[in-house]
Amino acid sequence: MPHILSFCDYLLHQKRYSPHTITAYKKDLDQFNQFLVSDFEIQDIKKVNSSIIRSWIVHLIENEISARTINRKISTLKSFYKYLLKNKELVISPLLKVLTPKTSKRLPVFIAETDIQNLFKDVIFDNNFEGIRDKLILEIFYATGIRLSELVNLNINSVDFNNSTIKVLGKRNKERLIPFGENIKKTLVGYLDKRKQISTMSHTLFLTKKGEKIYTKLVYRIVNHYLGTVTTANKKSPHVLRHTFATHMLNNGADLNSIKEILGHANLTATQVYTHNSIEKLKNIHKQAHPKA
């Protein structure tokens, strides 16, 4: 189908698409074209209708292609037909009456409570500036559920020792106060003592050993390294600790609205995803404990 090559050339000249993306688009369209020729003997793009596209979707489902992949292929078709409409090759897109398959939501990845306990009980952190800083970073992530960008931008005056709270500047410059416990207070005191020995003009809470504001890649490496000592989970990022905080809070009886406020979610829908992890936990408990499970 010559239109596919002209579409790929069009994408290339847009300079918004990587070669990898264009190759993926071409692969999807070539597969669709192969289906048209083999199943319907169609070589003219103008003869394709919504019924044929639905047949292609059924064909993909029967070949055990995931809903997520099918939706990606349909997205490719939509871009292709949008291009054809723009160039007046078609008057109407056959995709207007095509419904995409529903994709199952991915559950947030989190670290088991026993692994987190091992992290703070068994892992040895050096008793120097970097060691205490790294421990504090992990403790704050797990105890508050803050985002990576929020942690990096914490200032010394963000910490209120009298009220045991941290002031966090979240998305849309919205401030929120998050409480912290005695363990963090103890580590904070030790870290600030070490921090005084670092030559710096920065008011940022977390610094590099050179006295500069800590940066996201370094924090990611710190979290990835230490989580790697206690878990074999594929994902070992600061965001996984955010998921871990929310899941453990919910599993231990915290109110969903309270978790929403601490996480800084704009609405409850974003927080409700963690209930799925809790439901999975209940299913496992039921399966293990109930004689008829």
Image: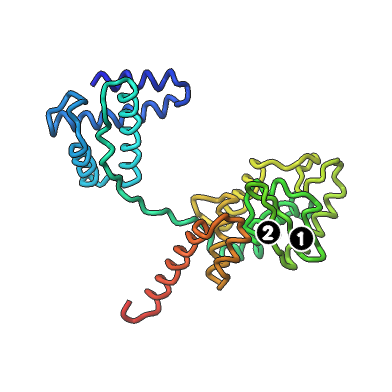
Nearer to the camera, 99 or 133 = 99
Residue occupying image coordinates x 47% and y 67%: 278
User: Considering only vertical position in the picture, is 173 above or below 274?
Assistant: above
Outermost residue toward the front in this view:
91
Left or right relative to 47: residue 12: right
Looking at the rendering, in which quadrant would you find the N terminus? top left
Left or right relative to 21: residue 150: right
* Other residues around mark 2 within 10 Å, as few (<14) / some (14–19) / many (≥20): many
For the residues labelled 1 and 2, say whether their Cβ atoms are less than 8 Å apart. Answer: yes
Residue type pointed to by label 2: Glu
Image location of residue 82, percent across then percent down = 34, 28
The residue where tag 2 is placed is 139
Left or right relative to 219: residue 26: left
User: Considering only vertical position in the picture, is 1 above or below 102?
Assistant: above
Image location of residue 177, percent across then percent down = 71, 59
Residue occupying image coordinates x 77% and y 63%: 185
Left or right relative to 154: residue 172: left
Residue type pointed to by label 1: Thr
The residue where tag 1 is placed is 187
Nearer to the camera, 156 or 232 = 156
Image location of residue 227, percent across then percent down = 59, 54
Image location of residue 179, percent across then percent down = 71, 64
Quadrant of res 105? bottom left
